[in-house]
C-alpha cells in the first residue's frame, strides 16, 4: 500500500475533532455543571466528576470511532483513516492504546505530536501510532488483508515426520 502524504488533512481532521470535543465539553457543562452564577460560562461550572466525564466521553469518541471504522468525524470529512502498519484494519486494542497516548501527543497544543510526525519521515506517525503500530492513510486506499497462514502439510508428510 503506497501512502500518500496526509499531514495537512490530518491537521484539519484534528481541528474538526477538537470542535466535536468542544461540543461535548459544552454539553456536559450545560447539563451537569454546577450553578455558580447565572452568567458563568459553562466551563466554570465543572466539578471533579464533570471533568472526569468530559475526559471519558472525549476518549470514547476517538476510541469508538476509530475502532469501528478507522475514522473520526474529522477523518471521515477529510478522507483519511487509521490502519495497522501492515495496512489491515486497526484492532480495538491498537485504537485504544493510540487514544490513551493522545494525552501525551496533545501536550503543548499537539506540538509533541507534530514533532513526532515530522521526525518519522514518510511514515508520519505520532507517539500513539508508534506504540499502537498504526498509521494514518488516505481512505481511498484499500485495506490490505493480513496474509493467510500457510496450508497444513498433507497427511502423508505428517506421518513421514512421525516415523523418522
Image: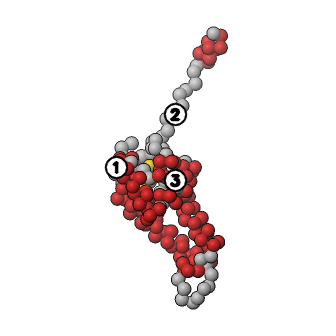
The x, y position of residue 100, in whole percent, is 55, 56
Residue at image position (59%, 64%) is 56
Compare marks 1 and 2 and give the one earlier in the sequence.
1
> Around disc 3, counting alpha carbons within 10 Å, would you say few (fewer than 14), some (14 to 19), or many (20 or more)?
many
Kindly identify which numbered label has been placed on residue 148.
2
Q: Does residue 10 appear to the left or right of 157 in the view shown?
A: left
Q: Does residue 79 appear to the left or right of 33 in the view shown?
A: left
Residue named by callout 1: 4
Closer to the camera: disc 2 or disc 3? 3
Residue at image position (49%, 52%) is 128
The x, y position of residue 4, in whole percent, is 34, 49
In the rendered view, would you say 145 is above or below 152? Answer: below
Q: Kindly state the secondary structure of the residue where label 2 is placed.
A: loop
Kindly identify which numbered label has been placed on residue 98.
3
State how far apart marks 2 and 3 are (Cα): 26 Å
Compare marks 2 and 3 and give the one earlier in the sequence.
3
Question: Is residue 31 shown to the viewer in this render?
Answer: no
In the rendered view, would you say 147 is above or below 17? Answer: above
Give the position of the N terminus as an image quadrant: top left
Residue at image position (44%, 64%) is 108
The x, y position of residue 150, in whole percent, is 53, 28
Amino acid at each position: 500500500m503506497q501512502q500518500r502524504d496526509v499531514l495537512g488533512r490530518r491537521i484539519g481532521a484534528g481541528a474538526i475533532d477538537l470542535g466535536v470535543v468542544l461540543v461535548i465539553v459544552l454539553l456536559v457543562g450545560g447539563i451537569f455543571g454546577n450553578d455558580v452564577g447565572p452568567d458563568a460560562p459553562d466551563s466554570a461550572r465543572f466539578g471533579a466528576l464533570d471533568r472526569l466525564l468530559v475526559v471519558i466521553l472525549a476518549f470514547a469518541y476517538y476510541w469508538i470511532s476509530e475502532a469501528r471504522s478507522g475514522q473520526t468525524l474529522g477523518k471521515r470529512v477529510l478522507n483519511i483513516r487509521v490502519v495497522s502498519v501492515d495496512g489491515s484494519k486497526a484492532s480495538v486494542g491498537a485504537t485504544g492504546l493510540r487514544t490513551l497516548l493522545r494525552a501525551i501527543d496533545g501536550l503543548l497544543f499537539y506540538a509533541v505530536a507534530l514533532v513526532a510526525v515530522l521526525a518519522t519521515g514518510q511514515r508520519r506517525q505520532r507517539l500513539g501510532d508508534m506504540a499502537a503500530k498504526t498509521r494514518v492513510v488516505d481512505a481511498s486506499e484499500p485495506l490490505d488483508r493480513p496474509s493467510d497462514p500457510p496450508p497444513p502439510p498433507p497427511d502423508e508428510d505428517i506421518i513421514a515426520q512421525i516415523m523418522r
